[in-house]
Image (cartoon, rainbow, N blue to C red):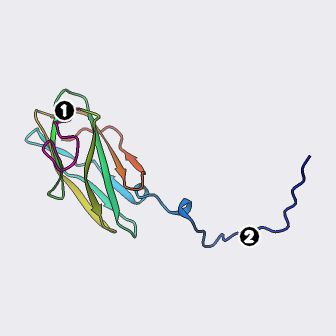
C-alpha cells in the first residue's frame, strides 16, 4: 500500500495561466446567417461573422454542405478571393457538398465584422438548405444549424 500526504496546495484562481485557460478563437466569433441570400440564384452573399474578442482570429478552413448536386467554384470573404478551383487554396477542383476548403487563411481583427461576399456555385441554389462549418487556426470549430438563404 502507498500513502500520499499533501502538505500544501497553491492555486492562482484570480489569474490562471497556461493554454488550457485561453479562450478558443471560435468562442469569440458570432455568425449571422439570418440574412444570407443567393444573388442571381448562384452566389451566396450576406453571411456575416463578427469577432467580438480582443485578439485577431484566423479562419483556416471552411466547409459548406447543401442538399443538391450543384458544385461550388469560388469563395470570397470581404471581396478577397480566399479559395477557387484554380487557387488560392485547395482542393483545386469544383467542390461538392461537404468537401473541406483549405482556404487562403483569412485574419479577422478584434472587434471587426467580415462578410462572405461571394460563394459562387455552378448552378441554381434557390431553395437549397446549407450548413456552414468554420475551422480556426487554433483548431476550434463553429458549425451552424441548417439555413435557407433567400
Looking at the picture, how far across and down is residue 55, in whole percent?
38, 68
Which numbered disc covers residue 16?
Answer: none
In reply to whether residue 85 is colored magenta, the answer given is: yes
Disc 2 target residue: 10
User: Foreground: 86 or 13?
Assistant: 86
In the rendered image, residue 69, in percent from the top left (x then y), is placed at 19, 26
Q: Tell which residue pokes out farthest to the left in this image.
A: 40
Image coords of residue 119 (percent x, y): 17, 45
**Marks 1 and 2: in contact by CB < 8 Å?**
no
120 on left or right of 136? left
Where, quadrant-wise, is the C terminus in this rendering? top left
Quarter residue 91 falls in: top left
In the image, taking residue 147 as reference, residue 79 lies left or right, namely left
Residue that sits furthest to the right in the current view: 1
Magenta residues, start to end: 84-96
Magenta span has 78? no
Q: Which mark is residue 127?
A: 1
- Residue drawn at point x = 60 percent, y = 69 percent: 16
Mark 2 or mark 1, which is nearer to you?
Answer: 2
> For numbered disc 2, what is the local secondary structure?
loop
Label the magenta part by its dominant secondary structure.
Answer: loop
Of the residues under marks 2 and 1, which one precedes in the sequence? 2
Q: Nearer the viewer, residue 8 or 76?
A: 8
Instruction: Pinpoint residue 53: horizontal percent, then vertical percent.
Output: 40, 66
Pointer 2 local density, CA inside 10 Å: few below 14, some 14–19, many at least 20: few
Which residue is rendered at x = 77% and y = 67% of the image?
9
Outermost residue on the top side: it is 69
The part of the image, by quadrant, that contains residue 145 is top left
Amino acid at each position: 500500500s502507498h500513502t500520499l500526504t499533501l502538505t500544501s496546495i497553491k492555486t492562482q484562481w484570480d489569474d490562471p495561466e497556461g493554454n488550457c485557460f485561453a479562450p478558443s478563437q471560435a468562442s469569440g466569433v458570432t455568425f449571422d446567417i439570418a440574412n444570407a441570400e443567393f444573388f442571381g440564384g448562384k452566389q451566396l452573399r450576406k453571411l456575416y461573422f463578427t469577432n467580438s474578442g480582443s485578439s485577431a482570429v484566423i479562419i483556416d478552413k471552411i466547409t459548406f454542405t447543401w442538399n443538391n448536386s450543384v458544385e461550388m467554384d469560388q469563395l470570397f470573404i470581404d471581396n478577397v478571393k480566399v479559395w477557387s478551383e484554380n487557387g488560392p487554396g485547395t482542393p483545386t477542383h469544383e467542390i461538392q457538398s461537404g468537401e473541406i476548403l483549405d482556404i487562403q487563411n483569412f485574419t479577422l481583427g478584434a472587434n471587426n465584422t467580415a462578410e462572405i461576399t461571394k460563394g459562387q456555385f455552378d448552378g441554381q441554389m434557390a431553395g437549397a438548405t446549407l450548413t456552414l462549418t468554420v475551422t480556426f487556426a487554433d483548431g476550434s470549430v463553429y458549425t451552424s444549424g441548417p439555413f435557407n438563404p433567400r
